[in-house]
Image: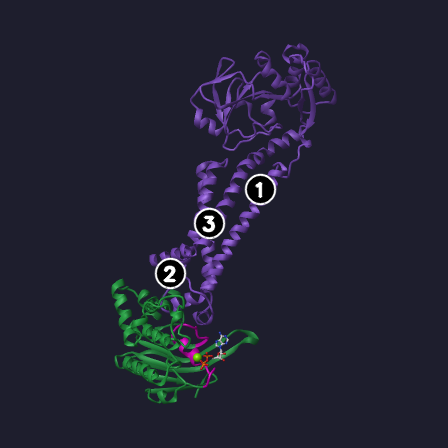
Chain colours: A purple, B green
Amino acid sequence: MLGEAVAGLRAALREWPLTFMFAGLTLVATSMCALLLAFALPAVRAQAATDRLTAADAVYFSVSYTEVESVAPASAPALKDAWLRAVESGGGYSAVYTNPPVSTSHDGEVLLAIGQFAEAFGIDKSVWPEGTALVGADFAREYGDSPIFVDGESVPISGVFARGYSFRDPWNVWGSADGLAVVRLRADRIVDMGPAAFEEAVTRTVLLRPSQAAVDDYVAHAADAGLLLIPKSLDDQPTTLLGVSQPVAQTLVMSAAFLTLALMACGTWSAHTARRSRRELAIRRLHGASVAQIAARHAAYCGFSVAMPFGLAAVAASLILPFDRATGIVVASTITLVLWAGLTVASVRAGTHGEIGPALRTKGREWT
Amino acid sequence: MDIVVAEDIAKAYGTGSARMEALRGVSLSLKAGETVAVIGPSGCGKTTLLDVIGLVLRATGGSLEVGGVPTGSLTDRAAARLRNATFGYVRQDFALMEDERTSTNVELPLLYRRPRKRRSERRRSVQDSLAEYGVGEVVDRRVNTLSGGEKQRVAMARAMVNRAQVILADEPTGCLDSANAEAVFQALLDAAAKGSAVLMATHNTEMAARCDRVIELRDGLQV
Ligand SMILES: Nc1ncnc2c1ncn2[C@@H]1O[C@H](COP(=O)(O)OP(=O)(O)OP(=O)(O)O)[C@@H](O)[C@H]1O
Ligand SMILES: [Mg+2]
């Protein structure tokens, strides 16, 4: 058996330009798919949140800084009142990500969540009291023990998001929760946290089920403070069925097609090699090689030229994808084993189906 | 005891309208040391008969025992073992791996034999066997560089290398001049003298007459 496997490896090596081409193709295609998936999966995961926000007719805003001399928004008391109404009584929410008054001993990212944030994303508020943080899986692993200070106050961690948990962020800056700490804060605390944080909170406000009058009112107050807000709805964003942005989805489909083609090419090549060597395999069987011994030869050949590069890429991919690592490795190895077994069975069948007699009469080049 | 007992063997190729009955009830038995010739016109089923006996084709009717083992429901592995342990094959088209060296080809029966001999012993057996047929010098040549006659003698050397109990020789002298043909035929007689059974398909009636028995086929029927 071992001898047969070595012969299979030698065959793969003897055809090294092809073997390496297939190995390379498989590797590139698998890695491409994995990388794209790593981008796309959080968006896919965020679909439920998107649906919830869309159902709530969420309105968000983009900012246009046209006024050269703007009034500092923080110094406009009318805007403060309007904003507090919007995110507290008005059923909206907001977040501060870029300018949070946060200090940590590390550079893990912190998001301040304000207003109806938990409701908007369907998070159970009983496990997330105000003034505490829910953290992503990576954040928990890397910085779980270090304290987070918001505006000088220590924030306890009350829970961990499942790996891959994603928000739907209209601005696409804090989609995946994996690397984040999300601190739930009362809105009025933001008002006192300085102009930068407040301005961000005003612009990143999302209104849920607002009346047209409420939107107009909010925009008018912001405009008075020098902040030109343009209301937008989530429907304006190009999304596909999966909630992935269109270019990402297109590239994903294309690289999946590429991967399929690469694997098909490998499979076709293995089967072709087997068919081509049908006569030689028949000669070996004539002299006492069993199909099992021939399968060992094919398994080594297919394993080296296809399954191994695919497996390496798939396992590497499972490390960057937003899944639980152990599960990822198990899934990747299972797919690889299934692929390997499938290829081996297919090429053994192609090389040994039927009786030996007719196979001896076929023309064909030799295996090794 | 008979090494091979074949009764009422039938073999059909293909199905439906493409069905072709190559053997229609052939019976024979082989004893150790016996030489049996199979003769008949081209297409009468000589190669098919040798292939069925040699477990290369499965009979579609009748029964076949090899070494006392009924072969009707052998597993692939058991059939492979039995082929290796019982038969030496000299095929009409030689069945050599053309891109491989002569030594690799002749080593095959030893390679799949259980228990397997050591590499050095296998190498010596291969060289001895080739030398016996006067082709010792081509041991490291690739088969596709050999002449037809050399290939035939290499095929003989491979069939004999395992000291097979039964030698199935399909036109073993077809490509040879009369002197070499006689030498090869003599080698088959020698093998029989040492205890192998020899079943030989041939068009050479003179050689057939020198065998212990002759089986004549016509359109798949024994006459
Ligand atoms: N795989 C096959 N499929 C269909 N018919 C076949 C097949 N192999 C052989 N035959 C047919 O079976 C018949 C017997 O063939 P076989 O090769 O046994 O003849 P043969 O007696 O050995 O002839 P020759 O003396 O020319 O070698 C022939 O008519 C042949 O065409
Ligand atoms: Mg023939």
| Mark 3 or mark 2, earlier in chain | 3
Q: Do the residues labelled 3 and 2 touch (CB within 8 Å)?
A: no
Kindly state the secondary structure of the residue where label 2 is placed: helix
Residue, disc 1: A252
In this rendering, does residue B68 appear at all?
Answer: no
Q: Which amino acid does label 1 sit on?
A: Leu
Indicate whether A270 appears above or below A249. below
Q: What stretch is highlighted in magenta?
A: B41-61
> Which numbered circle lies on residue B212?
none
Q: Which of the chains bears the disc numbered 3?
A: A
Indicate whether B116 appears above or below A16. below
Q: Which amino acid does label 2 sit on?
A: Gln
Residue, disc 2: A293
Frontmost residue, A362 versus A340: A362
Q: As drawn, is B21 to the left or to the right of B27? A: right
Residue, disc 3: A23
Within 10 Å of disc 3 (Cα), the crowding (few <14, some 14-19, many 20+) is: many
Name the mark nearer the viewer: 1 or 2: 1
Q: Residue B80, how many percent across, how many down? A: 36, 67
Kindly state the secondary structure of the residue where label 3 is placed: helix
